[in-house]
Amino acid sequence: MSEDRLLMFTDAARDQILSFIREDPADGLAVRVSVQNRSPIAPEYEMALVEEHEREANDRTFEISGFDVVVDPASADLLAGTEIDWVESLQGSGFRFENPNVKPLGSEPLEGPLVERVQRVIEERVNPGVASHGGRVQLVDIRDNVAYVSMGGGCQGCGMASVTLTQGIKEMIKEAAPEIVDVQDVTDHSAGTNPYYR
């Protein structure tokens, strides 16, 4: 991918960046774009104005629409093809990243022997245990040997959900599928309407 296609900026994003550069008294400013957290759930990006002495020898540097962009090698692959926009709303304003390399959890079919083993232990061991509390656990995705699960029914919003996950669900899944390195709960527990407490 050519350098000018690594990142794309909308007109609104470009205008905002140029405005920030004009307001800064330093010379030779560039925009550093990096990935701070590679979480498949919610990757975190960072943009900052950097001076010449803050650039690293192995950075990829290219000019886009009147300013230099600096990207570290570790971020370059994940950022390839990303469009950066500037958005303003009632909640505030900021840069928004549309990254084609980040696929939301559950966006692809769950299949394969590892998925089948994890789903089997959830159906045969985990769900019968949480059913007495009106709860249910579902496998959402497996990425890089991390299993992502959601909790519903009485487990959603329950103050004991994290204990159930770490002391029960995680142990059962890792016992049945030792290649699973972690199990993470992606439930929105704040939306639970009937949590089980006793």
Image: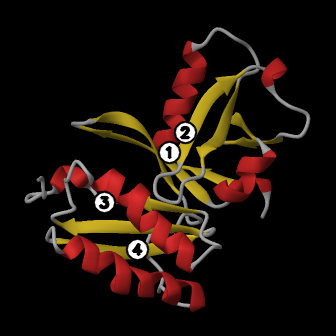
Q: CA distance from mark 3 to mark 2?
A: 36 Å
Q: CA distance from mark 4 to mark 1?
A: 37 Å
Q: Quadrant of residue 101?
A: bottom right
Q: Are marks 4 and 2 in contact (CB under 8 Å)?
A: no
Amino acid type, label 3: Thr
Say whether residue 134 is visible.
Answer: yes
Q: Which mark is residue 14?
A: 2
Q: Is residue 4 left or right of residue 118?
A: right
| Element carrying mark 4 | strand
| Element carrying mark 3 | loop
Could you say where residue 51 lies in the image, as x and y percent from the top left? 75, 19
Q: Residue at x 64, y 25 (%)?
A: 49
Q: Which residue is mark 4?
A: 140
Q: Which residue is mark 1?
A: 11
Q: Which mark is residue 187?
A: 3
User: Residue at the left extreme?
Assistant: 194
Q: Are marks 2 and 1 in contact (CB under 8 Å)?
A: yes
Q: Is residue 25 left or right of residue 41?
A: right
Could you say where residue 69 lies in the image, as x and y percent from the top left? 71, 38
Q: CA distance from mark 4 to mark 2?
A: 37 Å
